[in-house]
């Protein structure tokens, strides 16, 4: 009956964020902006994942607790989103080669999957995880 529909994030610079997510294969397919330019919405898609990007002219900064998993995971609410890969080492090489992040530590999660985290231009945590 139900299918996953989208993930929504809020950013300070829509164009910068769109370019960041395009590096991972997302493609923009829809956009809208208010007449007074107080808000812009851009929709990006990667396979069946839809990423909805909100960009408000006036925004509230990301709280300090949301900047690392150690301080963010104990706080109630949505935490991050993840992109799955076949090979975590190749994903790490891609991220470093494309200058997305350079201080990457691959860890093995409690459920046995290798993963690492990076941050988008707004400090939003994004997990890269090896799939079965």
Image (spheres, rainbow, N blue to C red):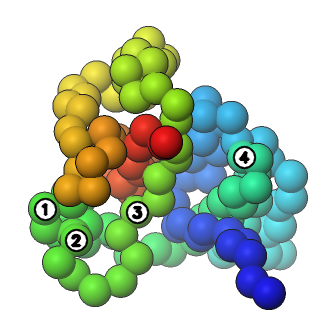
Q: Which mark is residue 80?
A: 3
Q: Residues within 10 Å of mark 1 (few under 14, many from 20)?
A: few
Q: From where the camera sits, is residue 71 visible?
A: yes
Side of 126 where 84 appears, left or right: right
Quadrant for residue 64, please give it.
bottom left
Going from N to C along the chain, the mark reached first, 2 or 3, is: 2
For label 4, the residue is 46
Residue 48, image x and y in percent? 76, 55
Identified at 27% across, 48% down, the residue is: 112
Going from N to C along the chain, the mark reached first, 4 or 2, is: 4
- Per the image, label 4 sits on a secondary structure element best described as strand
Mark-to-mark CA distance, 4 and 1: 28 Å
Establish if 95 lies above or below 12: above
Quadrant for residue 7, please give it.
bottom right
For label 1, the residue is 70
Mark-to-mark CA distance, 2 and 1: 6 Å
- Per the image, label 2 sits on a secondary structure element best described as loop
Residue 9, image x and y in percent? 54, 66
Going from N to C along the chain, the mark reached first, 1 or 3, is: 1
Is there a contact, CB below 8 Å, between mark 2 and mark 1? yes
Q: From where the camera sits, is residue 117 visible?
A: no
Going from N to C along the chain, the mark reached first, 4 or 3, is: 4
Establish if 4 lies above or below 70: below
Establish if 66 lies above or below 122: below
Side of 43 where 118 appears, left or right: left
Is there a contact, CB below 8 Å, between mark 2 and mark 3? no
Q: Which mark is residue 73?
A: 2
Is there a contact, CB below 8 Å, between mark 4 and mark 2? no
Mark-to-mark CA distance, 4 and 3: 16 Å
């Amino acid at each position: 009956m139900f299918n996953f529909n989208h993930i929504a994030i809020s950013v300070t610079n829509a164009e910068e964020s769109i370019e960041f997510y395009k590096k991972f294969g997302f493609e923009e397919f829809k956009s809208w902006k208010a007449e007074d330019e107080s808000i812009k919405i851009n929709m990006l898609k990667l396979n069946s994942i839809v990423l909805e990007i909100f960009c408000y002219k006036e925004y509230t900064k990301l709280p300090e607790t949301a900047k690392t998993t150690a301080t963010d995971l104990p706080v109630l609410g949505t935490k991050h989103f993840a992109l799955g890969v076949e090979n975590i080492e190749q994903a790490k090489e891609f991220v470093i080669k494309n200058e997305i992040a350079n201080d990457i530590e691959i860890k093995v999660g409690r459920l046995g999957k290798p993963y690492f985290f990076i941050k988008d231009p707004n400090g939003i945590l994004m997990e890269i995880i090896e799939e079965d």
